[in-house]
Amino acid sequence: MTLIRSNLGRHVARALLLAVAAASLATLSAGCAVSDAGTRTPGRGPTTAAPTGRLCDQLPSGNAPGNPAALTREPADAALQWIPVLTKFEAAIRVSGLSADLREAKGVTILAPTDDAFTRRISERAFEELVLVRKDELRTLLKSHLVDRSLSLSDLVDAGNVTTLAGTSVTVSRRDGVIRIADRAETVCGDYQVANGRIHIINGVLGNPPDTVGDDEPAH
């Protein structure tokens, strides 16, 4: 019976993530359409400073949907949906109920781990259980990546230390041209400007993520 409940929980968690992904795709498809009635078109946007980092050249650019210039018009929660390496982080934000907080924030900085960063640090089972039943832990983990003001990479380096919405202190330093976050991660594409803040993509997970919630699948 325990095994049946475990399998059922995993299926439900996957269903939740698939539903979030499907909703994201629907939003993307809708956003690609242009209308004279004023529909926002993330495929176009004003000229803006380009994000910087070694991963940036693999992300949407030019007039492609989700290009950096277009995202300057999008609130933080919507902008996350257009960055293809952040699907796990964006899904977790939605499932946790933090989307509205990001949308309504007057200024926010998001240190967003890539999908690869989540895969390396948190097992599939741990992630599924966080999404399905450990919502408080999930929210705390996600808040470890949010700062309640809009800070560019230069602002972060100048500050040297910022406090996240989870109450954790995060150090920021520049070493050999690389910006390090809490000695756990590096920015791989920073300075995405969005309507109410900044998004900096990082290659590590901050806070205190579980290595595993189950016991049969260790983190990678």
Image: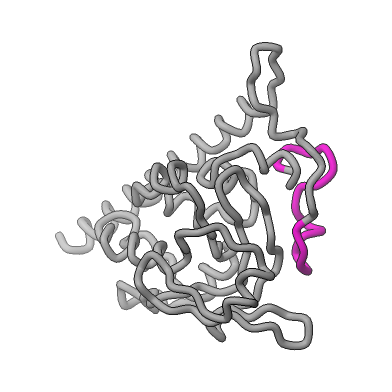
- Quadrant of image for the N terminus: bottom left
Pinpoint residue 14: horizontal percent, then vertical percent.
Answer: 40, 50
Task: Say how the picture is coloured.
Answer: one colour
Q: The magenta stretch spans which residues?
A: 51-66
Q: Is residue 84 left or right of residue 109?
A: right
Q: Is residue 46 left or right of residue 185?
A: right
| Residue occupying image coordinates x 57% and y 81% | 160
Name the chief secondary structure element in magenta.
loop
Q: Is residue 125 visible?
A: no
Count of marks, rendered view:
0
| Residue occupying image coordinates x 39% and y 42% | 100
Choose top left, top right, bottom left or bottom right for residue 72: top right
| Residue occupying image coordinates x 77% and y 87% | 176
| Residue extending farthest top | 37
Pinpoint residue 177: horizontal percent, then vertical percent.
Answer: 78, 81
| Residue occupying image coordinates x 50% and y 73% | 205
Placement of 156 over or under 173, stated as above or below: above
| Residue extending farthest left | 1
Q: Is residue 142 left or right of residue 49?
A: left
Between 189 and 18, the one lying in front of the other is 189
Pinpoint residue 173: horizontal percent, then vertical percent.
Answer: 63, 83
Placement of 104 over or under 200, stated as above or below: above
Pinpoint residue 103: horizontal percent, then vertical percent.
Answer: 46, 42
